[in-house]
Every structure is written in structure tokens, then in C-alpha cells.
Amino acid sequence: MILVIFLVLIITEAVYEALKLRGKDTLSGVIEFFNRALTIVLLSLFMAGWSWDLKNDGAGYVIGGYVLLRFALFDVLYNLTAGLSLFYIGETKIYDKLWRKFFEWTRFPEGHFLWMFKFIALLISIVWLT
């Protein structure tokens, strides 16, 4: 259940941000509203005492699973929706600058390395969140 919730939140955020970049403000606004409303509902349920079935692993695996799932999916979905290349690395955010420095330093092929790294992160996140 938590995996599905996290997937919906990550996918909707990536899509509405990319649509905003493409100038589709109305559709982006509708999807952003859905994302924010779902986040508020989930936080309200959690604050009211609703609990997820977290196995015996605890919150560390849930938080780590979310971070890995977001790393694996967000950029790929954002780039596809925005019409950019699959593993496009920007130039403005610190995250992008760090990746650029890493690839300059190591001379690894960007696409192959990111595909492998994100695929491993996706597999680990699925295991931790199911």
C-alpha cells in the first residue's frame, strides 16, 4: 500500500512540474492540486492515528525506500514528460552540478551509469516498501 501511495505522489509531482516547464499551466495546476490534496489527506490520516503496515523494518526502511524510489523515477518521468532526453542532466541545480562533476571526473558514460544506478535503486526501494 505504501509503495502505491509513494508511486502516485512521485509520478504526479514529476508530471506536473514537467508540464509547467512545457507551458501547460492548466493541466499542471490540476495535477498539482491532486498531488497536494493527497499529501494533505495522508498527513491528516497519519496525524489522526492511522498507521501503515510497516512489517518489522520500521520507519528507516520507509524513508529510505521513498528516497530511493524518488531517485529512481522522478528525473526519468520528468524528462520524458518535458520532452527531454531520458537521462538529461541540467545545469542549474546543485544535484545536476554534482552529477556533471562526477561524470567529468570518472568519464563514465552518463546514460549507462544512470540507467544501472537508478534501476538498482528502484529494485531496493520496491523490496523495502513491500
Image: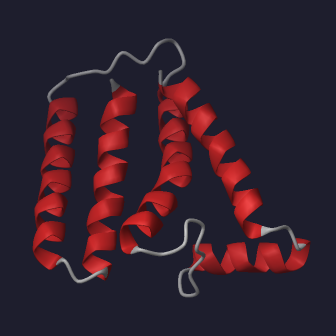
Residue at the image position 89 percent from the left and 71 percent from the top: 106
Rendering coords of residue 9 (x, y %): 30, 47
- Which image quadrant for residue 105? bottom right
The residue lying furthest to the bottom in this view is 92
Report the front residue among 93 and 112: 112
Taking 19 as reference, is 53 left or right? right
- Which image quadrant for residue 108? bottom right
Rendering coords of residue 44 (x, y %): 14, 38
The way the protein has been coloured in the rendering is: secondary structure
Report the front residue among 87 and 9: 87
Residue at the image position 37 percent from the left and 66 percent from the top: 81
Residue at the image position 29 percent from the left and 81 percent from the top: 22
- Which image quadrant for residue 99? bottom right
As drawn, 63 above or below 30: above
Please state the total of marks drawn on the protein image. 0
Rendering coords of residue 95 (x, y %): 60, 72
Rendering coords of residue 91 (x, y %): 58, 87
For the N terminus, the image quarter is top left
The residue lying furthest to the top in this view is 56
The residue lying furthest to the right in this view is 106
Taking 68 as reference, is 52 left or right? left
Report the front residue among 11 and 36: 11
Residue at the image position 76 percent from the left and 58 percent from the top: 113
As drawn, 33 above or below 8: below
